[in-house]
Image: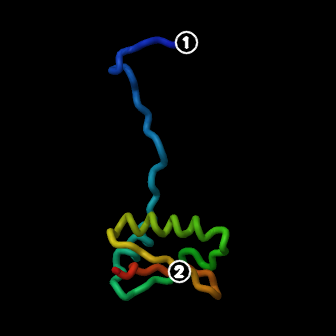
Amino acid sequence: MSDEIISEDEVTVSPRGRKVEINPEMAAKFSKLKPGQAIRLSDTFGSVDKPRRATVSAIIRKHWRHVREDDLRIDYDANTGVPCVRCKAAK
């Protein structure tokens, strides 16, 4: 094969990136959450050690944004390390 100039109509495009994988159970839990409520994700994630918290938080945010438009707050229990998620209070 050699480099050649072709018409742009001959260019084929391959898909880029990863397909977003959503856990329907977690998404359903987040969609049902009302203001003033929080959800403790002990069954979903269990105790999360500090090095993994950024990864777990990214997974939580991805699922939250899939089903909601409001902001969220993620807190990790000081004793157990279990993530708790709630709607962020409006300012």
- Crowd rating for badge 1 (residues with CA inside 10 Å; few <14, some 14–19, many 20+): few
Residue at 54 percent across and 79 percent down: it is 83
Q: Which of marks 2 and 1 is nearer the N terminus?
A: 1
Rendering quarter of residue 65: bottom left
Residue labelled with disc 1: 1
User: Which residue corresponds to the image point at 37% horizontal and 82% vertical from the top-left?
Assistant: 89
Of the numbered discs in the image, which one, if any, rests on residue 39?
A: none
- Look at the numbered disc 1 and give the secondary structure of its residue: loop
Q: Nearer the viewer, mark 2 or mark 1?
A: 2
Name the residue: 53% across, 80% down: 75
Residue type, label 2: Asp
Q: Identify the amino acid type marked 1.
A: Met
Residue 68 lies, in percent from the top left, at 34, 70
Q: In which quarter of the image is residue 77?
A: bottom right
Q: Identify whether 82 is placed above or below 59.
A: below
- Can you give x and y, in whole percent of width and height, for residue 20 in the image? 45, 55
Q: Check the image and name the residue furthest to the front.
A: 91
Circle 2 is placed at which residue position?
75
Give the residue displayed 63% in from the left and 85% down from the top: 80
Compared with 46, 17 (above or below) is above
Q: Say left or right for 42 vs 19.
A: right
Residue 42 spot, x, y in % from top left: 56, 81
